[in-house]
Image (cartoon, helix red, strand yellow):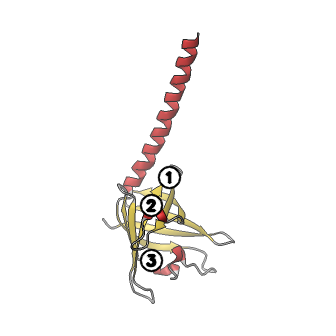
Amino acid sequence: MKNLLLAGVLGSMVAASCSTANQAQSARNNDYKLKGTWQVTNVDYDKNYKIKPFDEGVDVDCFVGSQWKLVPNNNTGSYSLSSNNNCPEVTTRFKFDVTPGRVFSFKKIPSGVKAKSVKEGYFLQLQNQSPNAFDLVQTVGDTPVNVVYHFQKIN
């Protein structure tokens, strides 16, 4: 009887660990679908608010046309803003992750700083993912405002 009970407990533990492993693998597969260079084609938000995302000190419209390079195998990336329409030229490196709950988190890595020493970052919801496009939704402000970044794959 003890052996039967022990076998049942072990069997349920194996099934639970396989389920968790499958969820992790599914999240990892979604990470790899993000591999490549992407361009922000549009940013939707309530125009009654002045949005300056990711502590860059620039208007959210400066992110339209920005290029984001994502390398999922080592969870690194960068985004580049081009100097046009009164926007400065900026390139920012970051580390990112996508959780099984489809949260895209990233932390900016300043030059000469190790990623493990950076404790703060940003959390956005990954939505509408396809092979050639996806959206990142950021909620900002005391009165929550959603900022939706629409991405299109370049290569």
- Horizontal and vertical percent position of residue 112: 39, 72
Q: Which of marks 3 and 2 is nearer the N terminus?
A: 3
In the rendered view, tell whether residue 111 sits above or below residue 88.
Answer: above
Q: Name the residue under label 3.
A: 64
Q: What element carries label 1?
A: loop
Q: Among all residues in the image, which is located at the extreme right?
A: 143
Q: How crowded is mark 2: few (under 14 residues within 10 Å), some or many (20 or more)?
A: many
Which mark, residue 149? none
The image quadrant of residue 78 is bottom left
Q: Among all residues in the image, which is located at the extreme bottom?
A: 86
In the rendered view, tell whether residue 76 sits above or below residue 82.
Answer: above
In the rendered view, tell whether residue 53 sits above or below residue 119.
Answer: below
Q: Name the residue under label 1.
A: 99
Q: What element carries label 3?
A: loop
Q: Mark 2 points at which residue?
A: 96
Q: Among all residues in the image, which is located at the extreme top?
A: 1
